[in-house]
Image: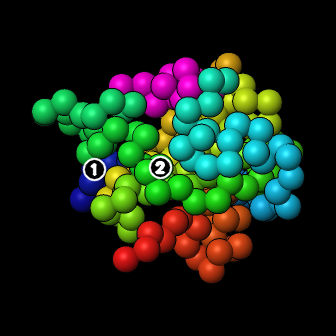
Amino acid sequence: MRQSLLRATLLCLLVAPTVAGCVVPGASPPPRSQVVEADARALAYGRSAAEIFENPQLRDKLRALFGADWNPPTPGGVGKLTGAAPEYFQVGGPVRMVTVGDASYISVTGCVRQDCNRRRGLLLIREGGEQLMARLDDGGFLHHYAFGTGLQPAAAIPVTDAALRALERLSDGNPYPRPAP
């Protein structure tokens, strides 16, 4: 009995500092975001998703942003989109200006014509066009993308999420296009 009590005490002494030392960082607050009144900056690369995707200043950057997802998926591609990235902007929403933190972005939403409620996209172009971020919703599976010096896809998550929240506040909860029946 005495040995089992001694073992239990020793185990508690070893485990307690480890458990007490585990500090789970709190979630950082989301970046401040808001939709600002559109001006000439919003239309710098086009008046629609189609024009933006064909803009010579952005065309190569957009291909680099989406990488292999720019093209239709190959059979057996695990974790890949069900379509090519540009398809997620077939039906384009309005081009708007959004500020996230201290940065201004041109934003455009879109969706796949046949599946607008499940396959949607958000594209953000930082003012100046040197940084691009995107979020594609592929039927509940989110894919995040980032292009620009030092940007990683994980860095796009808080920015695209904050921009999407600002767009949702402006549009009664659904910033994506609604195609005509």
User: Foreground: 98 or 3?
Assistant: 98
Query: Is 67 a magenta residue?
Result: yes
| Residue 37 spot, x, y in % from top left | 85, 61
Helix, strand or loop status at disc 2: helix
Residue at numbered disc 1: 3
Q: Which residues are magenta?
A: 58-68
Of the numbered discs in the image, which one, if any, rests on residue 89?
2
SS assignment at label 1: helix
Q: Quadrant of the C terminus?
A: bottom left
Q: Nearer the viewer, residue 136 or 179?
A: 179
Under mark 1, the amino acid is Gln
Colouring scheme, one of rainbow, by chain, secondary structure, one colour: rainbow
- Image-based side of 153 in relation to 90, left or right: right
What x and y, as percent, mark residue 62?
A: 54, 29
**How busy is the neighbourhood of tag 1: few (under 14 within 10 Å), some, or many (20 plus)?**
few
Q: Quadrant of the N terminus?
A: bottom left
Of the image marks 2 and 1, the number of the one nearer the N terminus:
1
Q: Nearer the viewer, mark 2 or mark 1?
A: 2
In the rendered view, does 106 fall on the left or right side of 39?
left
Q: In the image, 38: left or right of 138?
A: right
What residue is shown at x 55% (from left), y 36% (from top)?
53
Name the quadrant containing residue 163.
bottom right
Question: In the picture provided, is 2 more to the left or to the right than 159?
Answer: left
Name the outermost residue toward the left. Answer: 76
Q: Marks 2 and 1, how far apart in space?
A: 69 Å
Q: Residue 101 placed where, x, y %? A: 81, 49
How far across and down, in percent of the image, does residue 113 sit? 36, 59
Please indicate, yes or no, whether residue 71 appears anywhere in the rendered image. yes
Residues 129 and 137: in front is 129
Kind of residue at disc 2: Phe
